[in-house]
Each structure stands twice: as structure tokens, then as C-alpha cells.
Image: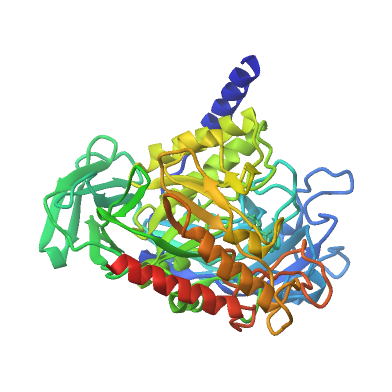
Amino acid sequence: MKTKLLLTLALLLSVAMASAQPALQNVYARDYQSLNGSWSYIVDPFDNGYYNYRLDVNPNGFGRNQKPSSPSELIEYDFDTAQRMEIPGDWNTQDEQLFFYEGSVWFQRYFSFDKSAQSGRTFLYFGAVNYLCNVYLNGREIGSHEGGFTPFWFDVTDKLRDGENFVVLRVNNRREPHYVPTVNADWWNYGGITRDVLLVNTPQTYIADYTVRLASGRYDRVEVSASLSEAVAGREITISIPELSLSKTLKTNAEGRISTTLSVKPELWSPENPKLYDITFTSAGEEVADRIGFRHITTEGKKLLLNGKEVFLRGISIHEEAPYRQGRAFGDEDAATLLGWAKELGCNFVRLAHYPHNEKMVRKAEEMGFMVWSEIPVYWTIHWENATTYANAEKQLTDMITRDKNRAAIIIWSVANETPHSDARELFLSRLATKTRELDPSRLVSMAMEVTGTSRNVSRVEDPMSKYVDIISFNQYLGWYGGTPADCLTRTYDIPYDKPVFISEWGGGALYGYHGDDATRFTEEYQNLIYKNTAVMLDKIDGLVGCSPWILMDFRSPRRQLPHIQDFFNRKGIISERGQRKMAFYTLQEYYSRKAAEQAK
Ligand code: GCB
């Protein structure tokens, strides 16, 4: 009891210490200059650019981008003659020597800025950098960031020069036990500046954030709120939705906020009709435009309801892994390919595992009519008792929800994956679940749990976390990790909760083009048999509202070492990394076409 209390106090304190910064909702709708492209880089395994020989932080480190002022001056690095790589992009797949590299790499580029045209504020924005980074502008450190999958930015208004400027980053992807994720995970630890870098201009006081959604339980009321970056009262903000002939102007309160409920009955967003409305927020000459959909996602006993109608989630899990070229995925093209395959499979749902994917992926999913599960990398043996770990996880959760809360496509926020039971875990995850509801009461909360026991061919999922979630999700690999594919034909489940049930992972591995009998591991036949038999098993699970088999495409993992079969790929994809569909792809397609037909009845 006492330890529990101490833990709670420590967790509370750590969160209170994290400082808040105004949001920068919908960054792509802002006035920005892209800093993507070719950057210089220096590999620094001993962190020589950061520490001096006494391991003190060196004020004259690589962040200064120094040049010798005379031929006699000793400077032992030079970005101008260093190698270059494309940003966004991971370093592991752009330089053969960095394939397994975990440590520091320095990045640098020049850019020009027209100070005379500057009005308002300028932010240096990063979509994501894995994992730790220190950011320097024109030779001075402007800040640092931890966490590999969420955006962050710095106000550089007064730090930019007219004409040439330069930015330097020290990026370090070394794994540490107390990080989120921790040292052990089943995916590649791609390092680098993996998402867009933008220089964003806003007015001095700008529209920082907004939320637009249907009012709880209503289809004829839309709740809108917006906030300025500063607590300026009496400022007008106009929201308009031209297609609904709607325009409303409100004055900000003392906190710089507006909130209102509009009487409108929008057409609803659904996979069959992914309707999005053009919406603009305007204030003092600034305009932020978005496309927003409206829908309700709720549960009733064991039922999952989209807009009040029962829905079955025909899902697939996806890693943020680039099709064809390998490495971290980013941008519209990767998203269109991956989601195009999910469409071809007959999916109406994607589980974006195991961390927040890039914003373009989420937006593309929404446009194409996929419901989305979005999660944070609280994975396996995270350090439950460490207050810093908790604060980090909560920050990643908050940043994910802040970025994507206006995406109708997202129906589930997931706070963890396959975590071992303990009191400390319960406290940690229940706090994350509570935080999720506080930040966003309009969606479902879940986490990928596990089968906790099997006796006489009946599997149970019993987890104290069940009381904190809206939907009981679990991963199971019968026929792959334990049991045989034939066992799926007779296995039943006992899940003692009056909540919808979802299988967030199932499947097995196969090397594309490797054929043999269906008892031989890694043949397409073996994988296909798991898919066929699991479909039979799914039909018998009471309250099952869908699944997201593991996984759409083979992905890189250092844990997968079998020569000539895995070669550092997790082969549970139903499509290879080169886009070749395995037999199981067509089996799942068939199952989903049957489920879609059943649903349509
Ligand atoms: C799991 C994990 C997933 C792994 C998968 C596997 O349960 O959640 O991250 O990649 O199993 O292939 O073992």
C-alpha cells in the first residue's frame, strides 16, 4: 500500500514538472518552408562532438559548426565536406555502415531566411526524430527532445538571421532500459530525422489548437473549441463550414479560448462514405483550414457501434515500414501503397502499431475510409516503477492525441502492448487510461493484452486492466507460438467481461515463394493454414468485433535471425517487403469478403 502511494506521488510529481507549450494544430495547413532534402552528417560513436575528453558537455561541440579561422587552427570535423543523406529518412538504410548502428549521428544543413519578410513568429518543427536529439541554430543550442514518434518544435523567431542560417542536430538512438520503448522490441531501431522538418510562420498570437466533433450522443450538434497561443481576451475567431452554410464568430475569453455548440446535422463519416468537410478557423487575418469528419464510436455490452450501428473491424496491423525501398516510411506515397494493399484485402480498419505513425498516414487512412487504432510504444517490459518513464509515456500519449484528435478515422487510443502483469504496471497503465479519457472522452481506450491461461482447450483472457478499457483486445498466436494450426479448429475462449472483444494480433511467418507441405515452418502453406483455421476459430468467439492480424508487410527486426528465411525480417507479413502477396493474403481477403457480406445483411 505504502509503495503504491509513493509510486503515485512520484508519478504525479514527474508529470507536473513537464512544461507545456501551446499546440501547433495541423501544421501542414500553416505557412511553412520545408527544410527536407540533403543534409550533411557525421557519425559519432563516442559522442566526441558532444563531450570533451573529461566527458563534460563541450561548449565548442559540433553544434557550433565551426570553421578554422586560419590554416593553423585545429578543428577536427567539417560538415561542408562530410557525407550527405536525405531527410526525412532513417540512417540505417541510407548508409550500409549504419545498418546496425545505435549511437549518435550529427546532421547539418544551411538554409536562407528573409528576415525583412518575417512578421509574427517562426518555429523550427520536426515531425519526429528517433530517439534523443539536441537542436542547434546558428551555433547555439535551442533545445532537446526525447521520444522517436511525436512532433516537437522550437520558437526561433529571434534566433534567425537574415540570409544564411544553419541548423545542426545531434541525434542519438541508443536504447536504454527506462526509455519508451525500452531496450527490447521486435522492430528496427531506425535512427535519424525520420519525418518532415519545417520552418513554420505564424502570427505573433496564432490559432494554436482546435477540436471539432459531434456532441456526445447527438447527431445534430457539433462541438467546437479553439484556443490562441496566448491568453488574449476579446479576439474574434470565426469558424466556417461552407458546405453546411455555417459561419460563426465568437470572442475569446480571458484564457484566449472559444467554445460553442453548433446546431448542424452533418453527413456522417464511415468506411463506406468517408465524408470530410472543409473547415476553416480565421482570426486577425490568419486562416487555418482543415478537413474534418463526424462520427460516433461507442460500445453497448459486447457490441461495437459506429454511428449507432454494429460494426465488425476487418483490420490489419501495419508498422511504419517503407514498402519496396525499406526503412522508415514517411509521406503520401508510402501511405498510399500500404493502405492501398489494406483496401485490396477488404479492410475497413488498420492498427497502426506500435507507436504513433506519421500524420500523413493517419490522414490518408481517414480519406480512404479506414478506422484507425493508434498507440504509444509502451511495449513489453517497460520500467513501470520509474517516474521518468511514466512522464515520458504520458507526454507521448498527450502529443499523439493533440496531433490527431480531429481525425474521425481514429476510433481507439491504445496505451500499451503485451505487458507483464504487476501492481506497478496496473498503476502506470490505469493512469495512462485515465489521462486518455481526460484528453479525449470521444474515443475508445484499449491496450493489447494477452491470453492468460488455457485449460482443456479453453483460453482465458483475465487481466485487471480490463476495467480500464472499453474494448478487450488481446494478441494470440495459436499455431505459431505454441500449439499447431489444427488446434485453432477446436480452441474456444472464455472472456469474462461484458465488453466487445478484439484480437489485436494473430498470424505466423512465411517466406514469400517458399513452398512445401503445410506442416513445414515458414512455408506459405503453413502460414496459410493458420489463416484458414484461425478464421474458423474467430467465428466462435463470443463478442468478437474484429481483428487486426499480424501483419500487412514483412518488416525489419533485429530479433529475426534465421539465415535465408528471415535475414533480419519478421516474416509474418502477408505481403513481402517487395510487395509480393503470399497465399495467406488471399485467405484473409476471402474471410473479409465473407464478413463484409454478413455485415451488409
Ligand atoms: C507480438 C508483438 C509484435 C511482434 C509479434 C511477433 O506479440 O506485439 O510486436 O512483432 O508478436 O511477430 O512475434
Quadrant in which residue 241 is drawn: bottom left
Quadrant in which residue 517 is drawn: bottom right
Q: Residue at x 44, y 50 (%)?
A: 542
Q: Position of residue 347 (x, y in %)?
A: 43, 70
Quadrant in which residue 526 is drawn: bottom right
> 181 or 302: which is nearer to us?
302
Taking 127 as reference, is 459 above or below it? above
Relative to 96, 246 lies left or right: left
Q: In the rendered image, which quarter contains the N terminus? A: top right
> 515 or 190: which is nearer to us?
515
Where's ligand 1: which quadrant?
bottom right
Taking 13 as reference, is 346 above or below it? below
Colour setup of the view: rainbow
Relative to 380, 445 lies left or right: left
> 489 or 24: which is nearer to us?
489
Q: In the rendered image, which quarter contains the C terminus? A: bottom left
Q: Position of residue 259 (x, y in %)?
A: 22, 43
Number of numbered discs present?
A: 0
Relative to 35, 554 lies left or right: right
Relative to 520, 276 lies left or right: left
Q: Residue at x 72, y 62 (%)?
A: 106
Q: Residue at x 23, y 66 (%)?
A: 277
Q: Residue at x 54, y 27 (%)?
A: 12
Asked if one can make out residue 18 in the rendered structure from this viewpoint, the answer is: no
> 157 or 129: which is nearer to us?
129
Q: Position of residue 172 (x, y in %)?
A: 72, 55
Asked if one can make out residue 297 in the rendered structure from this viewpoint, the answer is: yes
Q: Position of residue 493 (x, y in %)?
A: 54, 48
Taking 488 as reference, is 52 above or below it? above
